Image (cartoon, rainbow, N blue to C red):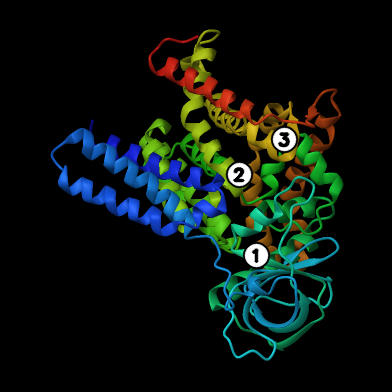
């Protein structure tokens, strides 16, 4: 067994440890010292039995497994008086700073507040609160504020684990509609202030240059803003299987990055130049949306796809993808169970790695792929990657959103070809529109045409009978069986024993 394979299996054991810990009772996870003692014991065995390969490998993999469990255990919150969630259930006067971009919705705004103190206490308090407030007055990132609030622990609702959802951001306290007073404005990180200010200017340029509902699509597509998106259009995008283009997600960014590189290759650029140009586009895109943790994770996933395409074979990406997952779990182990966006991103890229060969095998039985014209080959490549991502994320979508879009392959084929062109067109238009506001409607005209096309597809396709299926109950065992079936197909394809 080579060193690369040993390292890959070790990483998988670490991920398995994170997965096991994600479902262990809290009383077991509280035994963090014991998990660490087990790691020390494995390290001693590694030293003593260095020359015994079987014992060495067994101890190594158990060490990585216990490391995953231990890493998850130390990420859990400590309920001590210096943490804001210690005061859940009581009403407190809170002082803190708005430490993230305000999340503006249709009827309210959510502020992520980093707490610095409470009431008259001289004890230094840390932690975050997610406060839901009225739309007006609107406060900004970096504002130091004071407010009275009844702190509550997040609770589950409608079978949605809101507590676990917020825990991945280290938020364990929520507050609803406090009366907020500003103490001092203009604080916060200089870099983020400039990025958020620039985003707001670009968003205003989009609203000025585009009518509704086109501007409501352009905002989420380019900047990650969901404010102004009506429930009607949210449902239409979900029914058509195109919800991913309305969010800055790993799935969306990976497909977008791959599509940009495929188009650059189709334009005649070498793999090296196409890779660097697509990577540069990806880098500036992540910075433009404010470089939040979710977008940076999505950027990592997108870059891995570009790297594999530069090498010429997506199936060389497995080791890099697993290593990237390990690094992300070291930073935030709660991602594996509680971050649906991460799950979808990871599975989408796995699909891009392993499904295209299966698809090519089936297609080769009915036609000669090598004779496909170059222009159609570009469409085929984008289509196969998109279908791969959709197929590998299907069970997670069904489990979390209680709906499966049966027309998703068709809608993605009709829409994703224009996504790179639309992204670039809107990016250029909003920059020029911010510089020359009076000409914004004229500058945005090419973007308007593509946005109208997408909205037409999204509005029309779900009207087809059985375009989507609502799922009232989904047995989680189907997920395991589903992926076992694809593992079987992958093994058959690699061994040339195709079903």
Nearer-N-terminus badge (2/3): 3
Judged from the image, the secondary structure of the residue bearing numbered disc 3 is loop
Judged from the image, the secondary structure of the residue bearing numbered disc 1 is strand
Nearer-N-terminus badge (3/1): 1
Q: Tell me if residue 120 comes above or below residue 285 in the rendering.
A: below
Q: Is 81 on the left or on the right of 234, as rendered?
A: left
In the rendered image, is residue 274 in sight? no
Nearer-N-terminus badge (1/2): 1
Q: Is 164 on the left or on the right of 486, as rendered?
A: right
**Which residue is denoted by mark 2 in the rendering?**
252
User: Between 464 and 164, which is closer to the camera in this rendering?
Assistant: 164
Quadrant in the picture for residue 9: top left
Between tags 1 and 2, which lies in front? 1
Quadrant in the picture for residue 476: top right
Judged from the image, the secondary structure of the residue bearing numbered disc 2 is helix
In the rendered image, is residue 172 in sight? yes
Residue at 73 percent across and 48 percent down: it is 160
**Which residue is denoted by mark 1 in the rendering?**
172
Task: Calculate the distance from the C-alpha at mark 2 to the C-alpha at mark 3.
Answer: 12 Å
Residue at 48 percent across and 54 percent down: it is 72
Q: Tell me if residue 11 comes above or below residue 182 in the rendering.
A: above
Residue 68: % across, % down: 42, 49
Binning the other alpha carbons within 10 Å of mark 1 as few (below 14), some (14 to 19) or many (20 upward) gives many
Quadrant in the picture for residue 407: top right
């Amino acid at each position: 067994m080579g060193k690369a394979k040993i390292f890959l299996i070790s990483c998988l054991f670490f991920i398995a440890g994170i997965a096991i810990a994600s479902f262990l009772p809290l009383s077991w996870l509280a035994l963090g010292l014991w998990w660490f003692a087990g790691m020390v014991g494995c390290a001693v065995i590694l030293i003593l039995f260095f020359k015994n390969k079987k014992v060495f490998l067994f101890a190594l993999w158990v060490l990585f497994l216990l490391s995953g469990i231990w890493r998850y255990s130390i990420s859990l919150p400590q309920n001590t008086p210096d943490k804001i969630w210690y005061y859940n259930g009581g009403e407190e006067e809170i002082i803190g700073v708005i430490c993230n971009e305000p999340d503006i919705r249709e009827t309210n705004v959510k502020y992520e507040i980093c707490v610095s103190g409470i009431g008259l206490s001289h004890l230094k308090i840390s932690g975050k609160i997610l406060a839901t407030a009225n739309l007006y007055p609107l406060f900004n990132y970096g504002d130091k504020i004071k407010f009275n609030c009844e702190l509550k622990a997040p609770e589950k609702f409608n079978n949605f684990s809101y507590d676990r959802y917020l825990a991945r951001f280290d938020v364990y306290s929520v507050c609803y509609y406090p009366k907020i007073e500003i103490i001092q404005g203009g604080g916060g990180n200089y870099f983020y202030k400039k990025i958020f200010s620039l985003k707001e200017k670009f968003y205003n340029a989009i609203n000025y240059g585009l009518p509704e509902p086109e501007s409501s699509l352009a905002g989420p597509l380019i900047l990650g803003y969901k404010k102004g998106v009506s429930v009607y259009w949210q449902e239409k995008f979900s029914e058509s299987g195109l919800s991913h283009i309305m969010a800055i997600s790993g799935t969306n960014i990976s497909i977008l990055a791959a599509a940009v590189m495929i188009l650059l290759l189709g334009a005649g650029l070498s793999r090296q130049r196409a890779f660097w140009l697509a990577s540069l586009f990806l880098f500036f895109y992540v910075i433009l949306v404010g470089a939040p943790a979710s977008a940076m994770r999505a950027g990592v996933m997108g870059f891995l796809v570009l790297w594999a395409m530069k090498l010429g074979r997506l199936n060389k990406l497995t080791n890099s993808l697993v290593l990237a997952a390990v690094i992300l779990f070291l930073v935030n182990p709660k991602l594996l169970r509680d971050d649906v966006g991460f799950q979808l991103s990871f599975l989408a890229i796995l699909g891009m790695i392993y499904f295209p060969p299966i698809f090519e095998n089936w297609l080769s039985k009915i036609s000669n792929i090598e004779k496909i014209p170059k222009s159609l080959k570009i469409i085929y490549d984008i289509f196969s990657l998109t279908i791969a991502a959709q197929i590998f994320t299907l069970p997670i979508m069904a489990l979390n959103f209680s709906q499966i879009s049966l027309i998703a392959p068709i809608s993605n084929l009709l829409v994703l070809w224009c996504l790179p062109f639309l992204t670039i067109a809107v990016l250029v238009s909003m920059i020029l529109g911010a510089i020359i506001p009076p000409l914004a409607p004229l500058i945005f005209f090419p973007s308007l045409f593509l946005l109208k096309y997408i909205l037409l597809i999204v509005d029309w396709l779900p009207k087809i009978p059985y375009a989507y299926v609502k799922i009232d109950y989904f047995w989680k065992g189907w997920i395991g069986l589903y992926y076992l079936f694809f593992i079987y197909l992958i093994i058959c394809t690699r061994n040339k024993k195709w079903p």
